[in-house]
Image (cartoon, rainbow, N blue to C red):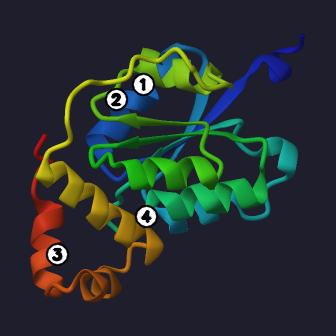
């Protein structure tokens, strides 16, 4: 195998510069060549005009980007330009709805923060589901159900807060405040 064939390339789409820097250093120590973008526009800039064989083999995409872009839109874009790219979604706002949508759009795996480099690399390598995964006996709280319903509606509206608020029957500012709060387990 030549050195060029042995190089693993990774695109990190993360708006938190400190986290992106830490992940970059960690993956570079593992032999990856890393490029970074903070949003969908940055991803488009990095990939436009790039030959298919020069695109990154792997992508780590944050679900909620400060630019207002959804990581789901990034996953959809990346799958559109290279359906062989292995994509893992990383989020601090995990919900069943966004996990399902990420997988439907082509992500290989969906990880909740905090996740370390070992977890992410294992997710890149995991090609099949695990029917033996432990089922939880914990009942779902009302707050968790609300959170998941909100995220399902957000996913249906392509993360348009105004439209999601209308469908949920609440004021846009109320929805924005709920989204800013930490998830209650």
Residue at mark 2 to residue at mark 4: CA–CA distance: 22 Å
Helix, strand or loop for disc 3: helix
- The reply to whether callout 2 and callout 4 are in contact (CB within 8 Å) is no
Residue at mark 3 to residue at mark 4: CA–CA distance: 16 Å
Of pointers 4 and 1, the one earlier in the residue sequence: 1
Q: Is residue 88 left or right of residue 185?
A: right
| In this view, the mark in front (3 or 2) | 3
Q: Position of residue 92 (x, y in %)?
A: 27, 44
Whether residue 173 is situated above or below residue 119 in the rendered picture: below
Residue receiving disc 2: 22
Q: Residue at horizontal 38%, vertical 64%?
A: 152
Q: Residue at horizontal 40%, vertical 30%?
A: 23
Residue at mark 1 to residue at mark 2: CA–CA distance: 5 Å
Of pointers 3 and 2, the one earlier in the residue sequence: 2
Residue receiving disc 1: 25
- The reply to whether callout 1 and callout 2 are in contact (CB within 8 Å) is yes
| In this view, the mark in front (4 or 1) | 4
Whether residue 22 is situated above or below residue 60 in the rendered picture: above
Q: Position of residue 57 (x, y in %)?
A: 71, 36
Picture quarter with the C terminus: top left
């Amino acid at each position: 195998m030549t050195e060029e064939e042995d190089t693993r390339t990774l695109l990190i789409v993360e708006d938190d510069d400190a986290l992106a820097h830490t992940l970059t250093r960690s993956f570079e120590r593992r032999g990856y060549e890393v490029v970074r973008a903070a949003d969908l526009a940055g991803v488009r800039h990095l990939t436009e005009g790039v030959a298919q064989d020069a695109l990154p083999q792997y992508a780590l995409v944050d679900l909620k980007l400060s630019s207002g872009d959804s990581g789901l839109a990034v996953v959809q874009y990346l799958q559109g330009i290279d359906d062989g790219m292995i994509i893992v979604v990383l989020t601090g706002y995990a919900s069943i709805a966004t996990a399902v949508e990420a997988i439907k759009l082509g992500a290989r795996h969906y990880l909740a923060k905090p996740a370390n480099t070992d977890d992410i690399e294992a997710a890149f390598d995991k090609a099949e589901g695990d029917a033996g995964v432990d089922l939880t006996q914990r009942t779902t709280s009302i707050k968790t159900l609300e959170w998941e319903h909100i995220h399902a509606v957000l996913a249906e509206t392509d993360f348009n807060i105004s439209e999601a608020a209308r469908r949920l029957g609440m004021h846009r500012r109320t929805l924005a405040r709920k989204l800013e709060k930490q998830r209650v387990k």
